Amino acid sequence: MTASIFIPSVGFGLVTASILALAAVGFTLQFGVTNILNLAYGDLMTAAAYIGYVVNRHGGSIALSLLAGAAFGALSAFLLNRLVYTPFLRRGTKLFGMVIVTLSVGVIIQNTLLAIGGATFFTYNFSVGSAVHPLGFVFNTSQLMIIGLAVAAMIVVQLLLTQTRLGKAMRATAANPGLAQASGIATDRVVDIAWLLSGLLCGLAGVVLVLNTTAFQSTTGSGFLVIIIAAAMLGGVGRATGAMVGALVLGLVTEISAAYISPSYKEIFAFGVLVIVLLVRPTGIFTGAQREVAG
Amino acid sequence: MNATAYYLTTLLVYLGVDIMAVWALNLQYGIGGVYNFAFVLFQAFGAYIAAVLTLGSSSGNGGFQNYILGATLPFPLPIIAAGLASGLLAVVVGLVALRKLRTDYQAMVMLVISVIATLTVTNDTGLFNGPAGLSLIPQPLSNVVNPSSVGYQWFYVGITFVICAIVYVFVHRVTSSPLGRALRATRDNEAAAEALGKDVVRLRLFVFVFGNVIAGISGAVLVQFIGAWSPGSWMYVETLVFLTAIIVGGTGNNLGVMLGALLVPVGFNEATRYLPQIGRPGLIDALQWIVIGMLGLVFLWFWPQGIIPERRRRFAPTPPGTAPVSGSAGSGSGAPLADPTVLGEPR
C-alpha cells in the first residue's frame, strides 16, 4: 500500500465530494419537499454551466459565473415547477407520469443546448491557480475554492433547515404536507422556496463541476445525474444531511479506488457501494423511521 | 428496385423488434406498474449474448475483438439463450431493486443500474469488446439462404414476424388471464391488492423477469440482423423512446402500444431521415430528441391514455350476500379504487 498516493487521492475525493454534495443536497431537498423525482436536474446543471460559460467568455470573473449559474438555476427550477410540473400534477398526472415528464424535460433541455451550442467541448477561460500542499494534500486554488464553497453552502443549508422557521416549515412539509398545511404553513410558498433553493444549488454545482473537469458538453450534467441520485439514495432520499454524507462517501470511494485500482472503474465502485447499501438497508443509511408517502 | 426492398425490409425488421420491446415494457409498466428504467439494458444484454454465441471463439476473425463465451450455436439457439440470459439478469436485478423499495426508489435504482451497466461494458474491454462494441456478427441460416440477397432480407423479416407472433401469444396469455388482472390490481392499488392476498412483490418480480426475457429476445433478433452492437446503442434515454411509444399508443393496451412502436421509434426516425441536413452536424439528431420529448409531454397533457386507450374492464355486479369486494380486484383501468364506502354499497 503506497501511502504517497493515499493522501492526494483523499484530496481529490474531497473535491469530488464537494461538487457532489452541492448537487445532491439540492436534489434531495426538492425531492423531499415536493416528492417529484426531477430527472431534468442534471441537464439543468449543464444549462447553468453554459450560462456561466457565456458570462466567463464575455470577460466576467469566475465569481460572476458562479452567481449567474446559481441565479439561472434557481429561476429555471422555479419556473419549471410552476409552468410544467405543477400544471401536470394538477391535471392528475400520477407518479410515474411525472417521472416521464421530468425525463422528457431533461432530454429537451439537453438537446436544446446541443442544438444551440453544437456537439463540441467548452472550456472556461480561467487559471486553476498555483498548487498548494496543506497537510500533504495536493490542491490547486480552484479546488480549494470549490471545497470552501461547498462547506459554506452545506453549513448555510444545515442552519436554514434546523434553526429557522422556514427550515422547520420545509421539514414539516416534507414529512406530511396535509398536516403542515392544516397547521397553518403556507405549503405552496414552501414548495416554491424548495425549488428556488434546489435550483440555486443545482446551478452552483453545474458551474463548479465544469470548473473542476475543465471541459464540458451538452451531456455532462446528465452523465453526473446518476451519481447524484446514488449519493442522495445512500443518505436516504429527502434528507439533506444524509446526502452530504452520501456525497462524502461516494467522493472518497471513487477517487481512492481510481488511485489504487483503475480510474475507469471508479463510478462502478461507487455504484457497488450503493447496491450493497440498498441490499442491507433499502431506504439509505441515515434514515430512522421512514416517512410514508402516498402514491 | 433493390434499394427500396432493402430499405423496406430493414424497416420491417426494426418494426418487429420495436413491437416486441413495447409489448414487453408495456407488460411491465402499463400492466404491472413496474418502473423499468433499465429496460434497454436487458435488450442490450440479449443482443450481446446472441452476438457472442454466434461469433465463435474470441480468437476468430484475427482475434481483433475481445469477448466472453465465444461459441457458434445454430439458429435459433442464440436467440433463446439471449432471452434466458436477460431473464436471469432480471432475476438478479429484480431481487435487488423490487424488494421492499418504494416505487419511485425503484425507478431511481433502475436508472442507476442502467448506467452502471453501460459503464461496466464500456470500461471492461474483455467483456463485450468495450466502447468499440462487437461487429461482423454472422446472420442466422446464412448457409441456407444467401445473406447478401434481397431474398435473405425478406426471409429475415419472416423470421422476425414469426418470433413476434410467438411472443404475442405469451404476452396475450398473461394480459388476458387472471394473472393479468392481479397485475393490474397491484398497479392500480398496491395496498388493496395486498389486502386481497396478492403477493405484490412476487407479481412484480414475475412481470419484470417475463418482460425482460422478451427484451432479450428482441435485442437478439435485432443484433443478428444488423450485425453490430456497441454501448452507444443502448444509452438509458433509449428506454424513454419506448416509454414514449407506449404513452402515445395507449398504456396498457397491446394493440395501442403496437401502433406506438410504429409511430415513435420507427415512424419518427424514418421521417426525419429524409429531412435535408441543415445546420451543423448533429442538429437534426438534437431536434429529433427534442420532438420525442415534446411528444411525450403533449400526450401526457392532452391524451394521457394514448391513441387506443386501455379497455375499461367491467365485471358483473356482485350478487347480494357475497363479499362486496370480490369484483374490485381487477376493476381495471384509470383511477385507483374508489373509496371503501362506495364499495360497500349494494350496487
Image (cartoon, rainbow, N blue to C red):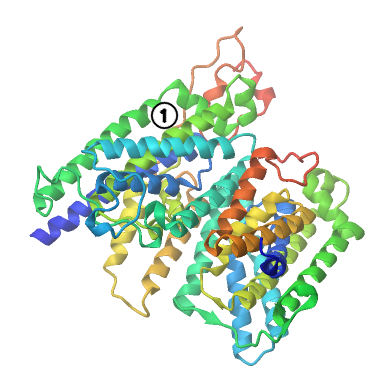
Is there any visible trace of residue A104 in the rendered image? yes
Residue that sits furthest to the top in the current view? B321
Q: In which quarter of the image is residue A214?
A: bottom right
Give the residue type at disc 1. Thr
Q: Name the residue under label 1.
A: B175
The answer to whether A278 is drawn above or below residue A206 in the figure is above
Viewer-side residue, B191 vs B139: B139
- In this picture, residue A177 sits left or right of residue B136: right
Q: Position of residue B141 (x, y in %)?
A: 15, 42
- In this picture, residue A193 sits left or right of residue B176: right
In which quadrant of the rendered image does the C terminus of chain A lie?
Answer: top right
Residue that sits furthest to the front in the current view? A1
Viewer-side residue, A132 vs A100: A132
Q: Quadrant of residue B235?
A: bottom left
Viewer-side residue, B99 vs A91: B99
Is there any visible trace of residue B255 in the rendered image? no
Q: Residue at x 61, y 7 (%)?
A: B321
Mark 1 belongs to chain = B
Viewer-side residue, B56 vs A250: B56
Q: In which quarter of the image is residue B79?
A: top left
Residue that sits furthest to the bottom in the current view? A59
